[in-house]
Image (cartoon, rainbow, N blue to C red):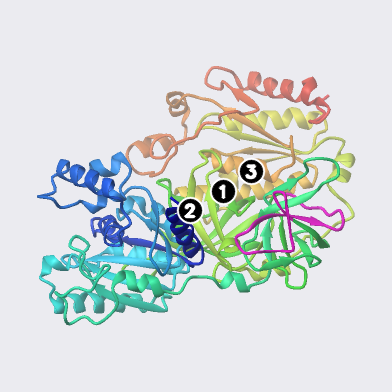
Amino acid sequence: MNDLTTNVDHYLEAQSKLDLLRFITCGSVDDGKSTLIGRMLYEAHLIFEDQVAALKNESRHHGTQGGDIDFALLVDGLAAEREQGITIDVAYRFFATDHRKFIVADTPGHEQYTRNMATGASTADVAVILVDAHNGVLTQTRRHSFICSLLGIRHVALAVNKMDLVKFDQAVFESIVESYRDFARKLSFEHITAMPVSALDGDNVVTRSAKTPWYSGPTLIGFLETAKAHDAVREQSFRMPVQWVNRPDRTFRGFSGTVVSGEVTLGDEVRILPSGEVASVEDIVLYTDRLTSAATDQAVTLCLDREVDCSRGDLIVAANNPAEVADQFEVSLVWMDQEPGHHGRAYWLKTGTTRVNATITNIKYKYNVNTLEHLSTGNLALNDIAEATLSLDRGVAFEPYATNRALGSFVLIDRFSNQTVAAGMINFALRRAKNIHRQKLAIDKAARESLNGHKARVLWFTGLSGAGKSSIADALEQRLHERGVRTYILDGDNIRHGLNQDLGFSDDDRIENIRRVAEVAKLMVDAGIVVLTAFISPFRAERDMARRLMDEGEFVEIFVDTPLEEAERRDTKGLYAKARRGELPNFTGVGSDYEAPENPELHLRAGIQSIDVCVQEILDYLDSPHVHSDQIQTS
């Protein structure tokens, strides 16, 4: 027993000294990624005998002939994957050889799950890109390669798999390699190592195959044991996003997080971003231990020598070499949602421990993944890869993705569904983000409201065309005007004669229409005016964007609820009839959906109530005690 314990101790000590390589397997569906990983584990003697026996039994159940093993079963852990014969989610596996430790991400090849592939690639040092020798380089092969390049992977093993199906023909191998290299010249890979393999039979996976005497390169496992890991962040300046302000009692205050680059030592001067406050490191705590320093990937708590304004989402950096802070960026996006992404639409942006509001201000172009040419577009569909610009509602500390993955990566999240809709990489801050600063003026909104004698508000009317929005807003403005309230109506049709005359009625144009109107309404509220907006504004996301532009309580959403049949009956312009004939595509209620408000401040039953009743209901709401002190003085 002592000998066994000693041997185990020696093994664990030897393993602890090995460096770690993270790699990803990717490519088109059914190129053999899971089988390849299973073969590596088996050939490296990293599977116990009882696992082998169980796999042989399960392989027979799945129709594998004789005593052969279906190696994909080692990796395809989800029942749904085994039923369909494809990988759906990202499967992570740890293994080690005598020379290195590995974490492999087996990613799905199906186009529908490209988002899962991007997740696996985001932490990888090396990509193993498989190509089926029988099918050659496919669109999904190119898409996965492009995403790997975008995500900073610089070293690639091009594994031309299923060489047994083409009788290990050297000409087939070289033709595929030439085709792939021709495409990859436009990418950012530094090294591409091509190798002919058969994952099913093990040729050139762990041991060199006698069936390819014409090949003199490394085996796949040999390549992985010598490939360079992505460790440049250890040599960069200190960066630590704050995950938690640690205050277990009144005497202790520390800032907890994981060091994402560089090293910090006791006594180092650090800067808090975005505030810019400076302090020195007084203590570095790891549970009950006190450390003299902390390096990349260590999770620690820093105690500083003085009180500073620092909270979750802030970034602690080396004081003499801080990161940048900006609120506008050029970014690369991989769109991951079935719902399209639109220019002008707002999302949550999450980077590290920070979450802010972000708007896609411009989609510069998307890529044709086969040719990498730039295609003009106003929206992004599932799996699209694009260059865009983002505007945030406040500055965040960052570094370009090419410099620091942790500080240059982010996801966009739908504000209503909480679905992750895109993964992104920051390329650089826009120059105007650094050169444009908000000018502080002597006369502010409060002063203008005081002069006007009432609070400024946005009364945002939304509903179908013909619901009665403009009629109710017009009647309400007359009543407010009689009471000395300074008002202005922004009406949908009127705005399209001037400010928005360049916009059509596609979803993209509707989003931009409401974005511009919301910005104008914000300026009018700042001027101390009560603004009444009468727009269909069919999408919740844009109405929510308009609400967020205003201060708390300034935005009053009024849902003018009229059934579609009644709205059509009232239609004096004949718009619904034209839409029914196909002459007005994307007309709300016919060719385009209307997303009704879920929690409006006012819900008017305009299909059965008269205009006067609707107006009085709004006035009663504004005069009610729970809003009277903070709303419009209407008496």
Q: Nearer the viewer, residue 626 or 137?
A: 137
Q: Is residue 234 left or right of residue 192?
A: right
Residue 581: x and y in percent read 32, 39
**Residue 454, above or below 165:** above
**Residue 230, above or below 585:** below
| Distance in Å between CA atoms under marks 3 and 1 | 13 Å
Which residue is denoted by mark 3 in the rendering? 546
Which residue is denoted by mark 2 in the rendering? 422
The image's mark for residue 347 is 1
Residue neighbourhood size for the residue with mark 3, other residues' Cα within 10 Å, grouped as few (<14), some (14–19), many (≥20): many
Can residue 306 be found in the magenta stretch? yes
Identify residue type, mark 1.
Answer: Tyr
Numbered disc in front, either 2 or 1: 2
Residue 587: x and y in percent read 42, 40
Residue at the spot 86% in from the left edge and 58% down from the top edge: 305
Identify residue type, mark 3.
Answer: Ala
Mark 3 secondary-structure assignment: helix
Numbered disc in front, either 3 or 1: 1
